[in-house]
Amino acid sequence: MDRKHTFGVILALLAAFFNGMVGILSVNLFQSGLSPEAVAFYKCVVALLIIVVLLAATGQIATLLTYVKTKWKALSVCSFFGFFMLYFFETASYETLNVAVVVFLLFGVSTLVTFFANALFERRNLVAQEWMSVLFAVLGLYLIFMENENIASSDNTGFVFAVLAGVGYGLFLVLNKKLNIGGGLVPVGGLLLFGVVYLFVPFSMSGFVGVESDVWLTLLLLALLPTIGGFWCTTKSLTILKSQTVQLVELSEPIFALMLGFIFLGQLVSPMQMLGGGCILGAILIHEVKLSTLKSLSKRKVATDSTR
C-alpha cells in the first residue's frame, strides 16, 4: 500500500470517527426542544457560515463562487443525496430509534448501494471478491448490534428513514467520485450551499424554531466535527480511493463507538461485537487485496517450486 493510498484510508477513518458523534449530539439537541428538521437545517447553516469565514480569511471566496458556477449541476445532485437525504432522514430517524439501530441500518444499506451502484454505472456484475466483501461487512454490522435490545422494538417510520438515509449516503459516495466533485473546503462549501437550500424546505414546513443560548455549543460541535470535518475527510478521501473502499473503511464508525464507550463509559465489548469488528476489518482486507496480486504470488511460488 503506497503513501497516497494510506493517506486516503486515514482520511476515511477520521471521517468515521467524526461521523460517530452525529447521533449523540443530535439526541442532545432533541432534548433541548429542537425538531429533527431544525437540527438538520441549523447545523448546515452554521457549518456553511464557518466555511465562508475561513474562505474569506484566506481569500478564496472568489474561488468558491467560480467553483459553484462551474459545478452547480453536479453539486445540486450530490448535495441532494449527501446532505438532504442523509441528514434529513438520519436526523429524523434518531428521534424514534436508538442510535445503534440507525447506524446499523444506515451503513448496511449504504454499503449495498455503493457496491451495486458502482457496478451499475460501470455496466458490470459484482465479482466474487466484492460479494464476499459486502457479505462480511453486513455480517460484521449485524454482529455488533444484534445484542441491542432496541432493535426488536424499532419504530417502523424510523426504520424507513434510516434506510433512506443509507440510500442517500451510498449514492453520494458513488456520484461524488463519478462527477468529480473534488475535496477540500471549497467543494464542501459548495455542497453545503445547496444542502442549506434543500433542508430549508422541511424546516420551514415544520415551523420556524429559534435556538436557545445553552445549545449553541452542541450545535457548533455538530457543525464542526461531523458536518465539516466528516465531509471534508470523506470528499478528500474520495479523490484518492474508490468509493467502495471509502464506504468500507467508514464502516469502522461503530468500532470507534464501541472503543469510546469502553474507554469513557466503561461499557464492555461482548465477544460477538469483537467478532463483528473482525468481520468489518476482514471486509476491508478482502476488498483491498487484489486478486491479481494473489495470482502473481501463486505463480511465483509455482516457479520457485519448479526450479528446485
Image: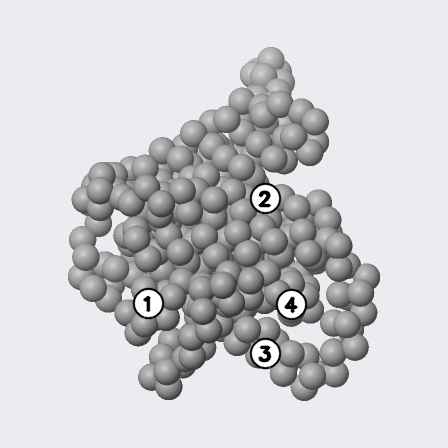
Residue marked by disc 3: 49
Residue shown at the point (75%, 54%) measured from the top left: 73
Quadrant including the C terminus: top right
Q: How far, Cα to Cα, is label 1 from label 2?
A: 28 Å
Q: Which of the marked residues, 1 or 2, is nearer the chain's N terminus?
A: 1
Residue 30 disc label: 1
Residue marked by disc 2: 171
Front-most of residues 241 and 34: 34
Report crowding for label 4: few under 14, some 14 to 19, many 20 or more residues within 10 A (C-alpha): many
Q: Position of residue 226 (x, y in %)?
A: 47, 65
Front-most of residues 12 and 300: 12
Q: How far, Cα to Cα, is label 4 from label 3?
A: 10 Å
Q: Which of the marked residues, 2 or 4, is nearer the chain's N terminus?
A: 2
Judged from the image, the secondary structure of the residue bearing numbered disc 2 is helix
Residue shown at the point (20%, 64%) measured from the top left: 265
Judged from the image, the secondary structure of the residue bearing numbered disc 3 is helix
Q: Which of the marked residues, 4 or 1, is nearer the chain's N terminus?
A: 1
Q: How far, Cα to Cα, is label 3 from label 2?
A: 26 Å
Q: Position of residue 228 (x, y in %)?
A: 54, 68
Q: Position of residue 209 (x, y in %)?
A: 42, 75
Residue marked by disc 4: 193
The three-letter amino acid code for the residue at tag 2 is: Leu
Q: How far, Cα to Cα, is label 4 from label 1?
A: 24 Å
Q: How far, Cα to Cα, is label 3 from label 1?
A: 22 Å
Judged from the image, the secondary structure of the residue bearing numbered disc 4 is helix
The three-letter amino acid code for the residue at tag 3 is: Leu
